[in-house]
Amino acid sequence: MEFFLLLMGNGILIGLMYSLIALGFVLVYKATDAINFAQGEFVMLSALIAGAVIVVAGLPFWIAVLIVLAAMIGFSFGLERVVLRPLLGRPIVAVIMATIGLAAILRGLGPFIFGVETRSISLPVSDDPIILGPFFLQPVQLTGALVALMFLGGFTWFFLKSRMGVAMRAVADNQQVASAMGINVERYFALAWAMAGIVAALGGIVWGSMLGIDVHVALVGLKVFPVVILGGLDSIPGAVVGGLIIGIVENVAAGYLDPYVGGGTKDFAPYVLMILALMVRPYGIFGKRKIERV
Amino acid sequence: MLSVRLSGAAAIAAGALTLGLALPAMAQQKEIVVGVQCDRTGATQTVGVVFCPGNHDYVALINSRGGVEGRQIKAIEIDHEYKVPQGVESYERHKKEGAVSILLYGTPHTQALTAKMREDKIPGTSPGFGSAAGADGQRYPYLFPVAATYWSQAAAAVKFTKDKLGGNLKGKKIAYLFYDNPAGKEPLVILEDLAKLEGFELRTFAVPAPGVEMGPQVLDIAQRFRADYVIAHLFGRSPSVSIKEFKRVGYPLSKVVSLVWGGAEADLAAAGGGAIAEGYNTIQFAGVGTDYQVHKDIAEMYKKQGKQPPKEMASTVYYNRGIFHMATHVEAIRNALKAKGANAQITGEDVKNGFEKIKGVTLGGLMPPMELTPTDHEGGGWVQIFTVKGGKLTKASDWFRAYPDVIKKHIEADAKKS
């Protein structure tokens, strides 16, 4: 039982950290109806910038956070303006293909610009575990989970209560109607991408400090696909619930099944769950019942 | 008439083709070509970016001193991204370039190329990785592990663990945390055998590629299995992740010993620095640090060229192994030239015979007291242990080998399988 609780605790914290990355998918999808397949690479890019700023340039952690945030907002704005805006009005598959291409470019350019060595950055927390009864809480995971919760709450408020958030939802719902209502659609597209940049910046710093920084950080993006499919591509609460479910399932599966099957269940269990979700409820637990061929 | 023309054209084409194929081999007369497989990109790139410069710097040093028996060596590097198809392709390209020996990299690649090397009579070296049965020179005449194989490393890890746990492993629990690929699985037979022999409980924990997450495995080792010691066999990104994870669940790193691909300065740096990894134990098949004459010689060579020594020299674990790896080829070529004459055209077969005469080459302690023979292509299976102390890898044992009888038994048993 103690081991089960340990795995659960670990899964919840990791799951919340997945939610932070999942939020990037959700924000872009909510505003533009497109899935950003380069979200993992955005996270990787943020981590690489953080590594360069902290390890190579030797700047303090909090300055580095500001630099990464500024860099990712700038990058996302630029990307929206140069690559995605010309695709406005084109079939959604064009945007998807553009993001897939972008992912490949970033994976190649990342090591080319920042080098291939793995760098290590630390969040300003201890490396030693916090022991609470049966739980071994890792301060880095705890911090990551708290950051994720804070931003998930903030974005939920933004979309539900703020004027801009409502406008963004209107844009996502129907671009033409929103435009006819006087909403500047292009501006909200840019805002959505910038928000995805902010989330990627935070995700990059958190996951980079967890895993070490190099091109492998992009793999987190792959892990997050089952999260958003399960929770619902257009739902912020879905990102949280999906993250928690995937985090718990992969940890428990690895803890109990790995000894019998020789390992690897952590990686495929989320995808089994994703396929099941697609078969039973393709729009996810909290997603809108709208199905399109992609 | 038409058929005569066609046959004439075919003859010309065949002649041109033969000439084309022969040219690289003739070029070998001047420079002796050695193939270098490398992994500067891909899952294990952290190794290649330091290891391969070590290969090239040693060749440059030898060439700067007039070469081997007056002959220059040309090391041709091909990156294979630690992927088998690219590894096989790079072998073919090296063969076409007239390579008389090849520095292999990667257990899956070595396994894929073993039969081809024998067929083509080109010796290949696999220091510190598979296949362990390649130590049997009679059975694998063209494969040379030239350093402790995974079997010897596993045996050494058990001996080290035994010493650390008071000289008796009866009733103790040892966890084997491994990268889930052929290289990771290779030491299992030795560990299982030694578990019976020494009376310890062995439990295995597989980490799938690319090994950037192992939370559940580490939790299991530390909190459920409650291992007395951990033998880790991870590569690429996974050693640094394991160091972080053990630290975060409060498991003492002084109870972890890593096989050879999990204990470089780069792994410590990626884990957050030596201070994080305090107490972590690593097995090494080449010397660690810069306190060797060959380092000074390479630095001097750069100085003469008006250059600074490369930054890779600071990452001594892989850089030194790069020197070690190339030095075995240089010595094999030296032996081949000594046997056939300094100006003779040497073949892969000559170099293979040269490998089997390597003895007493230590590079001032960077290499173990190895001796390669026609029967033993491993050279004895020597290792050293280094422990992280004060944030740095510190020598914790002299060269040693462990359970040679057990290793021999498994080599013989493997030979009977085919």
Image (spheres, helix red, strand yellow):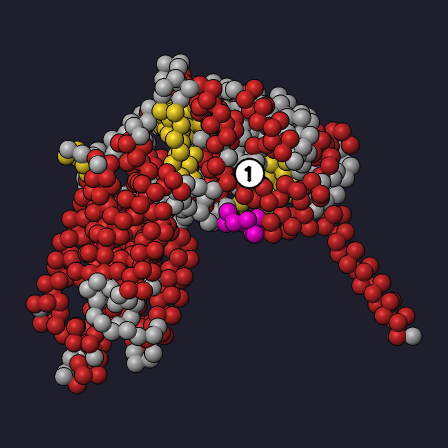
Furthest-top residue in view? Answer: B167
Q: Is residue A59 left or right of residue B257?
A: left
What residue is at 69 percent from the left and 50 percent from the top? B96
Question: Residue B298: in sight, yes or no?
Answer: no
Residue A271, compared with residue B170, is above or below; it is: below
Q: Residue A68 lies in what quarter of the image? A: bottom left
Residue B110 falls within the magenta-colored stretch: no
- Residue at point 40% right, 66% down? A101
Residue B213, given in percent of the width and then of the height, sits at 33, 44
Residue B27 lies, in percent from the top left, at 73, 48
Q: Amino acid at mark 1?
A: Asn
Could you tell me which secondary element the residue under label 1 belongs to?
helix
Please give left or right for residue B2 compared with residue A14 in the image.
Answer: right
- Where in the figure is residue A187, as x and y percent of width and height? 20, 74
What residue range appears in magenta? B80-87
Which part of the image, by quadrant, shows the C terminus of chain B? top right
**Image: B146 above or below B237:** above
Label total for image: 1
Q: Quadrant of the N terminus of chain B?
A: bottom right
Where does residue B348 sit, x and y in percent of width and height? 71, 39
Mark yes or no: residue A100 visible. Answer: yes
Query: In this image, A61 relative to B327: left or right?
Result: left
Choose between B124 and A9: the one closer to the eye.
A9
* Up-down relation of residue A79 to residue B135 (above or below): below
Q: Residue at x 30, y 81 (%)?
A: A89
**Would you name the residue on which mark 1 appears?**
B55
Question: Which residue is at the front of the view, A193 or B292?
Answer: A193
